[in-house]
Image (tube, rainbow, N blue to C red):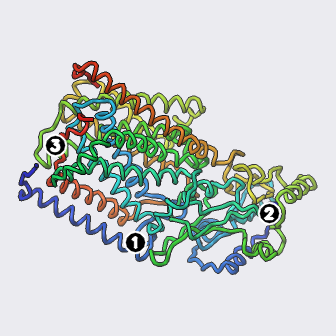
Amino acid sequence: MSKAFLIDLTKCMGCRACQVACKRWNNLEAEHTSMTSDSWTNPFRLSARTWTRVDFTELQSPQYKAGMKWVFARRQCMHCLHPACVSACPVGAFRKTDEGPVVYDAQKCIGCRYCMVSCPFGVPGFEWDKGLLAQPLIKKCKMCVDRLGAGMEPACVKHCPPRATIFGERDELLATAKERIAANPDTYINHIYGENEVGGTSMLYLSSVPFEQIGFPKLGSEAVTVNTEAVMEKTLPFAAAWTVILAATYGVVKFRERTNPQGEEKNQ
Amino acid sequence: MNSENKTSSPTISFSWTILIILMVAGFLTTVARFIWGIGSISNLNDSYPWGLWISFDLLCGIALAAGAFTTAGGVYILGFDKFKPLLRPAILTGFLGYLLAILALGVDLGRPERIWHLIIYWNPHSVMFEVGWCVMLYTTILALEFLPMPLERFGLKKPLSIIHKFTIPIVIVGVVLSTLHQSSLGSLFLIVVNRLHPLWHSKLLPLFFFLTAVAVGPAVVVVEAYLSSRIFKRHFELDLLSRIVKVIPMLLGLYLVLRFGDLVIAGKLGALFTGSLLTLLFWIEILIGVVAPIYLFSKASVRENQTSLVKTSLLVIIGVVLNRFNVSLIAIARPDGATYFPHLLEFCISFGVIAGGIFVFWLAARFLPIWEVSDDASKV
């Protein structure tokens, strides 16, 4: 069975305990940060040292009390069901496990960063400040796969005070999400982000506001890997056919030259 | 053998100084990158994982190296023997183009010391897997196509005759690998579904990359011949060159029809008239790099005049360069607040690599029979 998260943004209070728990469990260094934007979000984005982060969005509308409303949305790897990184990696360093986490084999990676280009959520981070001897790698949330093996919940889930993030089987969490929407149709919008996005993700989100308003990419339900994988399937047959066509063309041209030695007049 | 002694003129020594400075600067930057990391010499970041090196050195470099396979295919497979004088410089340019792209890739890759992993760890779903294999295999093919030049120079008749026996298979494999490689560079961006601007994202990206690479091939041959004629005081083969560019309007015409047809079918025509910066870039790319060369190269007066031939070829090159930058860098949406403009030291790497290419081309032109017409094909 496949494990997943249900992240209920209406319960999140923006405490960033998940950010801290993630750093502590995974021994991630602190980042130099600065308050540069008009939001409280910090650091600037996910990176090799920050695998989860709470986005702070300040929404303004007369319908809200005091004319504004905070929405807190923690972001991390979505652990897609059809992950772009797994499909894109030339050496197969990424793998979608049966248990749910998308994991990375640091021993294989060549550092081409195509995973970063292809990820629809812009998740993987690269260690830009490491030279050849320090051996830079790609880093991202691994759903605490090392804790799961020991029967523990992921660190961020364990440390979420209001239980805004819960952990479990994906289909059960989907059912829970639908129950919550049905029970409180005024609180939630009727959209479980991650249920169908890019073919489904292991991270499921509930929200009180449309996801576009809080910076979630608007994505279709088709996996982003379909086009590239379709092309790759056709590559070898195409190469074989093209070889035959070229060889045949050569044969025809040679044959004509032999039967018609006056072929000098040919123009392009 | 070419043994003109032109090195002593003052203009050459000035160019030499520039070349050497650029190569040394590029080398020192490379050393810094390996000690302190890519971040220390570049403005690349997690929102812009690929920048100048991928867009310019790799994507433009490989596209501009396409003259090698198109000329080889034209001469050996289609039997246009009269273009043979253009073949060796085109092969040399292509070979150097690939070697330089590999060099730049060695700087750009996070773990260049693991490049051999491509051979043992396979992921056949990955376009990058195909790209990697095409680079390795086609560079080998280009080395084989280049080999007769040094072999002739050093009078090694035995290996020369062996290579000549395999000329046709080598050329055919080279054309197949080039087709795969050029198109796969376009396929790389198929996966950037939600972030690549709709004016560039298309299921036909592989075909678009291939067609533009084939079209730019003759244009590069023209410009390379022009530069050689200036630097090495050689005769500019206007007659031949004005004939090979005849193919450009056909290829670019087909490309233009497909590109707009695709926009119509996908219902994206509205994106053509939004007045955004990207729409403007699209029109510049299409009008300067596609429509203008189609019009100009269909006129005999343009093709048969050295100056306008070279200038119009430059337009084709600019169009392809702009297209590669748009697809791989500019037209990809990033998170709010993310910025990238190449660091001075990133330019140092790219210019150093180009300087190295010119240097090696000069060495080859001086010491190898690159302008001699070999008789490889006629005996097959």
Do the dots labelled 2 and 3 sit on one chain?
no
- Which chain contains the residue that carries disc 1? B
Q: Which residue is mark 3?
A: B372
- Which chain contains the residue that carries disc 2? A
Query: In the image, residue A24 lies at what x, y percent?
Result: 69, 81
> In the structure shown, which secondary structural element does the residue marked by tag 2 occupy?
strand
Q: Which residue is mark 1?
A: B33
Q: For the residue marked with disc 3, what is the amino acid?
A: Glu
Q: Is residue B377 left or right of residue A220?
A: left
Tell me the quarter of the picture where residue A41 sits: bottom right
| In contact (CB < 8 Å): disc 2 and disc 3 | no
Q: Which residue is mark 2?
A: A3
> In the structure shown, which secondary structural element does the residue marked by tag 1 occupy?
helix
Residue B167 against residue A134 in the figure, above or below: above
Q: Sort mark 1 into few (<14), some (14-19) or many (20+) by Cα contacts within 10 Å.
A: many
Q: Quadrant of the C terminus of chain A?
A: top left
Residue at image coords 25%, 51%: B159
Residue A68 in sight: no
Do the dots labelled 3 and 1 sit on one chain?
yes
Q: For the residue marked with disc 2, what is the amino acid?
A: Lys
